[in-house]
Amino acid sequence: MATTRDWHDLTAERSGIGLRLPHLAEVVATRPPVGWFEIHPENFLANPHATELLLDLARDYPISIHTVGVSVGSAHGLDAAHLERFARLVERVNPFLVSGHLAWSTAHGQYLNDLLPLPYTDETLRLVADQLARVEDRLGRRYLLENPSTYVGFAHSTMTEVEFLNELVSRTGCRLLCDVSNVFVSGHNMGHDPYAYIDQLLSTAVGELHLGGFTPEEDEARPGETVLIDTHAERISDSVWPLYAHALRRLGDSPTLIEWDNDLPTLRQLVGEAARAEDVRSRAREVDRAAC
């Protein structure tokens, strides 16, 4: 285990940033003023030097582990070998949060470089609940599920995404990671109200929030319209910050992560985005206090 300090008891009220490999050496050298770091384990599993630097950081910062390779929605089952490697890293780092996606990314033993959508049916619910239980049993801890960014829907879905997530919580007692930017992206792309989505989500189940940038592109299926792509390659849109403030008031003051994975900015810019999240969080608290 990386440290004798128990990060599980921390609320991590300050905002965190995604720790990507190009920033790792600078972060180790400068110890920037952020509340915590999130890593993708797939960047560290085959990189012993990076893992040693991560373990050094874990003595001074809470660490969250957010996997993109545990495919809880795969109809072909979990990759047991990958789950085992992932679990061993979790044991070494002792993160205060572990999370992944409500999506699938494997088929017939092949990994796809995307997080693909699921039909929201009772059959899918049973599949995800069963595989989520297997992941949590191996980890020995909660595994938060993140709402996806959505571009298409399935005609045979029998429930909305938020209904699916709420029912999953009801059946399994799982926790959720609410990606506020994904809510905004999906609302734009699928034509639903992102504020209503936040209002319907079971607030007691949410244990973490994410914010990330998106890129507008021309919608080839609808000439003259735009589709928002969850690229994590831009600053957080000005349109998302009010939704984030609403989420804080509705879902609670959960740990918030700034995601930026592509076209990486300077570390200073990332820290600045986290500071902006802190400012929005402080103002949301003031509104709550004034309403009491």
Image (cartoon, helix red, strand yellow):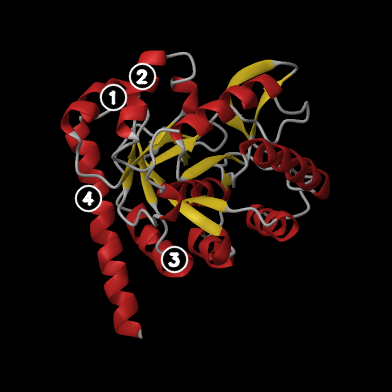
Q: What element carries label 1?
A: helix
Alpha carbon distance from label 1 to label 3 = 31 Å
Q: Which residue occupies the foreground of this view, 265 or 77?
A: 77
- Identify the residue shown where x is 50% and y is 58%: 194
User: Which mark sits nearer the N-terminus, 3 or 2?
Assistant: 2
Q: Name the residue under label 3.
A: 252
Label 1 close to label 2 by CB (< 8 Å): yes
Alpha carbon distance from label 4 to label 2 = 26 Å
Q: Taking 288 as reference, is 28 left or right?
A: left
Q: What residue type is labelled 2?
A: Ala
Q: What residue type is labelled 3?
A: Gly
Label 4 close to label 3 by CB (< 8 Å): no
Q: Is mark 2 on a helix, strand or loop?
A: helix
Q: Is mark 3 on a helix, strand or loop?
A: loop
- Identify the residue shown where x is 52% and y is 62%: 198
Alpha carbon distance from label 3 to label 2 = 34 Å
Q: Taking 253 as reference, is 100 left or right?
A: right
Q: What residue type is labelled 1?
A: Leu
State which quarter of the image contains the N terminus.
Answer: top left
Q: Which residue occupies the foreground of this view, 102 or 230?
A: 102
Q: Mark 4 points at which residue?
A: 275
User: Which mark sits nearer the N-terminus, 4 or 2?
Assistant: 2
Alpha carbon distance from label 4 to label 1 = 20 Å
Comparing marks 3 and 2, which lies closer to the viewer?
Answer: 2
* Residue 255 image point, x, y percent: 39, 53
> Is 36 located above or below residue 164 in the figure?
above
Q: Mark 1 points at which residue?
A: 24
> Is 189 located above or below residue 25 in the figure?
below
**In the rendering, which numbered label is found on residue 50?**
2
